Image (cartoon, grey):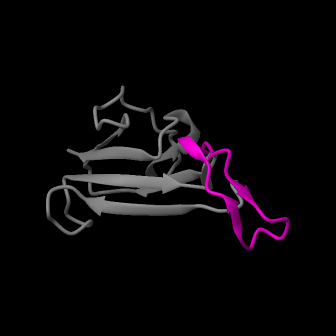
Amino acid sequence: ENRHASVYAVSADGADLASSKRFYLIAVGPAKMSGQVYDPARNQLENIGEGDVLMQVMNGRVTFNRMGGKRLRVFPLEPDGTRGRAVKLRKVRGTQGVLELSRGRTPVYEVVVR
């Protein structure tokens, strides 16, 4: 739903993603510094800006496949890495669930497999 986005999954326990018990899901879209300005063609940065980084809230979805009876819990992470409350996954037949990225209002989620 965002025009541009990058989504990454990174193991937090050293295991490959298929067998990881804990991993991070990172979903980012366009970001810029406050006051940042490009030329009209958006080919050259005219003012680097300063202060806070402004990021779009991601409006996409991530679908988790079934994992042989294992359960998932997904936690939005604060900028300092602390966990927020678990985000409820939307139930969709044939999947483990669907994460609505806008619900956590963060680019980083911790996914725990049990």
Residue 94 in view here: no
> From this viewpoint, which residue is outermost toward the top?
85
Q: Is residue 20 magenta?
A: no
Q: Is residue 39 above or below residue 62?
A: below
Q: Nearer the viewer, residue 16 or 44?
A: 44
Percent of width and height locating residue 31: 59, 52
Residue span colored magenta: 34-57
For the N terminus, the quadrant is bottom right
At 66% across and 62% down in the image, what residue appears? Answer: 4
- Compared with residue 23, is residue 83 higher up or lower down, i.e. above or below? above
- Residue at x 27% of width, y 57% of height: 68
How many marks do you count on the picture? 0
Residue 71, can we see it?
A: yes
The location of residue 97, given as percent across then percent down, is: 46, 46
Q: Quadrant of residue 75?
A: top left
The residue sitting at the front extreme is: 47
The C terminus, quarter of image: top left
Rendered location of residue 11, percent (x, y): 24, 60
Magenta stretch: includes residue 53: yes
Q: Nearer the viewer, residue 11 or 73?
A: 11
With respect to residue 42, does 73 lie above or below?
above
In the image, 69 versus 57, the foreground residue is 57
